[in-house]
């Protein structure tokens, strides 16, 4: 693998109270190693190893907010309750001791079942319209009371993240989970103020989440929002077919409190609107930054030959060069780059990239998902 000039990846970055030594982010990846929802010493050590090896910002696996059925896997960690929060205190202490920065990803899965386990919660699942996917009923339609309680749960999680000493947090608003189910017209059939014919209407729930969380942490604490066009229910789904529609979706969310938009693509190098600006045009993160003025994180198969959805089908992936990434960052298309599976198989990925030790990067194998190292 040829080693490009990677200096741009190792320039510092600052937004509000968050100061990073470089532009490399560890992407959130569900690991399911937290029995009873409590992250243990092995989880703390897992994140510390990446902090020791020059990852600029670590975003945790999805952590469940304090709502019934907010998770769909019994090994996914909570971000509420004395025991789980004590576990997360250990995690952030270890990351800080290694010189790293970190934020939890705060998560509610909505009506989506896990494809990795048959486990189901012992309480009804909830979603905007009682749908797991278009035309697929599952669980309950969220009442006004349920929505209010969910907003309060997000607010408590934000306050706890700041109290424990996390440097930021990320709201999971992507991939067909609860917040994304409100965005998507196929799963949000509501007739009240949280529904509507336009993406701007359907983004109102996410806007309320952001406002509640912003109030809980104050103006200088950075908030990251993860978003996607694609859904696990439909890989080809799109919320915004044009830049104008994307602006209608994202600008109000930045105005509501999002400082950084974490824009999930299957392949970061693909243009978001090729009809608008060609095959080498801006990717999702590039357009999000251009339209909103917010900082942007790009993500999607960084450093690997295959996309991450294939890994769940048993596909391996080999390391590939970073030239396209470097070119996009040098032209200021986006601010940060998130790395997922490459950091599962090689905790020292960032350090190796910096020193040019890229020829001996390991392949990614789905078997790595069954271990925590």
Image: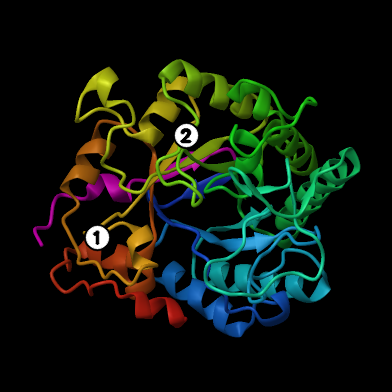
User: Dividing the image into 4 quarters, which one contains the N terminus?
Assistant: bottom left
Whether residue 54 is visible here, answered yes or no, is no
Q: Which mark is residue 295?
A: 2
Residue at x-position 63% and y-position 39%: 187
Total labels: the figure holds 2
Taking the magenta stretch, the answer to whether it contains residue 7 is yes
Whether residue 290 is visible here, answered yes or no, is yes
| Viewer-nearest of discs 1 and 2 | 1
Packing grade of label 2 (10 A; few <14, some 14-19, many >=20) is many
Q: Which residue is mark 1?
A: 304
Residue at x-position 70% and y-position 34%: 219
Give the residues drawn in magenta, as a range. 1-16
User: Dividing the image into 4 quarters, which one contains the C terminus?
Assistant: bottom left
The image quadrant that residue 34 belongs to is bottom right
Q: Is residue 230 above or below residue 38?
A: above
Residue 96 is situated, as x and y percent measured from the top left of the image, at: 56, 66
Residue at x-position 50% and y-position 71%: 47
Taking the magenta stretch, the answer to whether it contains residue 125 is no
The image quadrant that residue 358 belongs to is bottom left
Q: Which mark is residue 114?
A: none
Relative placement, left or right, of 32 versus 14 is right
The foreground one among 60 and 128 is 128
The foreground one among 241 and 287 is 241
> Is disc 1 placed on a helix, strand or loop?
loop
Q: Is residue 345 above or below residue 248?
A: below
């Amino acid at each position: 693998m040829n080693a490009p000039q990677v200096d741009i990846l190792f320039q510092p970055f600052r937004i509000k109270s968050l100061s990073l030594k470089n532009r490399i982010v560890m992407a959130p990846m569900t690991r399911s190693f937290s029995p009873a929802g409590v992250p243990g010493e092995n989880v703390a050590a897992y994140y510390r190893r990446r902090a020791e090896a020059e990852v600029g910002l670590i975003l945790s696996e999805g952590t469940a907010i304090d709502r019934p059925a907010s998770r769909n896997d019994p090994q996914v960690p909570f971000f509420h309750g004395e025991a789980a929060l004590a576990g997360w205190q250990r995690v952030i202490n270890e990351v800080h001791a290694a010189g790293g920065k970190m934020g939890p990803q705060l998560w509610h899965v909505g009506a989506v079942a896990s494809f990795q386990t048959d486990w189901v919660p012992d309480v009804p699942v909830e979603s905007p319209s009682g749908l797991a996917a278009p035309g697929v009923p599952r669980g309950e339609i969220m009442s006004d009371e349920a929505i209010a309680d969910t907003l309060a749960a997000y607010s408590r999680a934000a306050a706890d993240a700041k109290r424990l000493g996390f440097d930021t947090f990320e709201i999971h608003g992507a991939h067909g989970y609860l917040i994304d189910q409100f965005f998507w017209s196929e799963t949000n059939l509501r007739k009240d103020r949280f529904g509507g014919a336009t993406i701007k209407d359907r983004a109102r729930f996410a806007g309320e989440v952001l406002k509640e969380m912003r109030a809980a942490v104050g103006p200088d604490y950075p908030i990251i929002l993860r978003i996607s066009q694609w859904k696990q229910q439909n890989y080809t789904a799109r919320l915004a077919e044009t830049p104008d529609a994307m602006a209608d979706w994202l600008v109000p969310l930045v105005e509501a409190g999002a400082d950084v938009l974490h824009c999930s693509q299957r392949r970061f190098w693909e243009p978001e609107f090729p009809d608008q600006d060609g095959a080498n045009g801006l990717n999702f993160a590039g357009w999000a930054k251009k339209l909103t003025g917010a900082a942007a994180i790009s993500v999607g198969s960084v450093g690997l030959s295959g996309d991450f959805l294939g890994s769940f089908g048993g596909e391996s992936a080999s390391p590939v060069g970073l030239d396209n990434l470097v070119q996009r960052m040098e032209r200021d298309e986006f601010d940060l780059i998130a790395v997922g599976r490459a950091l599962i198989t090689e905790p020292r990925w960032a350090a190796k990239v910096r020193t040019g030790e890229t020829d001996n990067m390991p392949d990614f194998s789905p078997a790595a998902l069954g271990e925590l190292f």
